Amino acid sequence: MATILKAQSKAANAVGSKSGKHKEKRKRDDNEDEDVVMADDTRTIAHGTSNAQGDEGSQKKKRNKQRVLLLCSRGVTYRMRHLMNDLEALLPHVKKDSKLDSKNNLGLLPELAELNNCNNTLYFEARRHEDLYMWAAKTPNGPSIKMHVQNIHTMDELKMTGNCLKGSRGIVSFDKAFDETQWGRMVKEVFTQIFGVPPLARRSKPFIDHILTFSLLDNKIWFRNFQVMEKDPEQPNGPVQMSLVEIGPRFVLTPIKIFEGAFNGATIFSNPEFVSPAAARMEVRRSKGEKYRIRKGVESERSSRRELRRRPEDELAVSKVFS
C-alpha cells in the first residue's frame, strides 16, 4: 500500500513538473512574441521616421536651379553690346556664349542651352545694324517670346547716382496690369524665372540691394533698375528712410509674338498693333517721296501757267526794229 502511494505521488509530481514546464515554455513563447511585435513596431517607427527624415531632406535639397544662356547674333552695335554687358552684370546666374552665326536656324539655341546646362535663354537678334529683337525662352520645351527692343540707355550712358553690389540678388517687381491679360501672365512667369536670381547661384552674393521693375504701359514693357537706400545720404546718422535711386540700364520692350515651343511652334499670341521698324522707315521714305512729287507737280503747273499767260511778241518791238 505504501508503495502504491509513493508511485502515485511520484506520478503526480511528474505531471505537475511537466505542466509547470509547459506553462513556463508558453510564457517564454508569449514573451518572445511580444518582443518580436515590439521589435517590429520599433522597426516600423524607425523606418517611418527615416522616411520622414528622407522626405524632409529631399525637401531641403530641392533648389531653384535657374540658369540663363545669354548670346547675340552677328551685326550688333556697341550700344547693343553694352546693354548685354549690363544685363550680365545684373544677373549672376547668366552664362554668356559667343555670337550665333546663323540667324535663320534658331533651332540650334535649345541645343546650345543644353550643352551649357541652362534652362533659360536670352537671345539678342540684330537686324540691319539698327534694329534689335530680344528672344526670351524656356528651353527645351518653351514657351518663347519675341520682343522688339527700343529706347536703349546703358549704365555708362546714363551716369546715374545709384549703385549696387555686383552679384547681389534683386527683387523682381511687376506691374499689376500683367495679371489682367493672359499673355501678360505668361510674360510675367517667364521673366520671373529668367531675371529672378536663385539664392544659391554660383556667383551670387547673399545681399538684396536693388529692384528690377517691369511696368506695362501702352502695351509695352518698360524696364528700370533701382537701388534700395535705407538712409538719406545727406543725413547718414538720421532715422531710417527707405528710398529708391535709379541705377540703369533702361529699355522698352514691345511684345510681337509668343510661341508654344522654344524658338518655334504654334503662335499663342500675336500683337496686332505692332509695326516693324523697317515698315515704319519705308512709310517715312514714302511720305518724303510724296512731298517731293507734290512739289514737282506744283512747279510744273506753275511753268505751264506762265507759258499760257505769256503774250505774243510784237512786230514793232525795240529788239526787232533796232536789231
Image: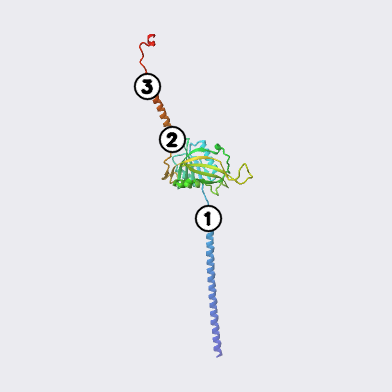
Q: Which of marks 3 and 2 is nearer the N terminus?
A: 2
**In the rendered image, which quarter is residue 297 located in?**
top left
Nearest-to-viewer mark from 3 and 2: 3
Foreground of the two, 203 or 11:
203
* Sequence-first disc among 1 and 3: 1
Is residue 252 in sight in this rendering? yes
Name which residue type carries label 1: Gln
> Residue visible at 54% across and 86% down?
8
| In-front residue for pair 175/134 | 175
Label ID, residue 305: 3
Three-letter amino acid code at the position of disc 3: Arg
Residue 112, how many percent across, how many down? 48, 44
Provide residue 53's location: percent of width, then percent of height: 54, 59
What secondary structure is found at the residue carrying circle 3? helix
Residue hosting label 1 = 59
Q: Name the residue under label 2.
A: 280
The C terminus - image quarter: top left
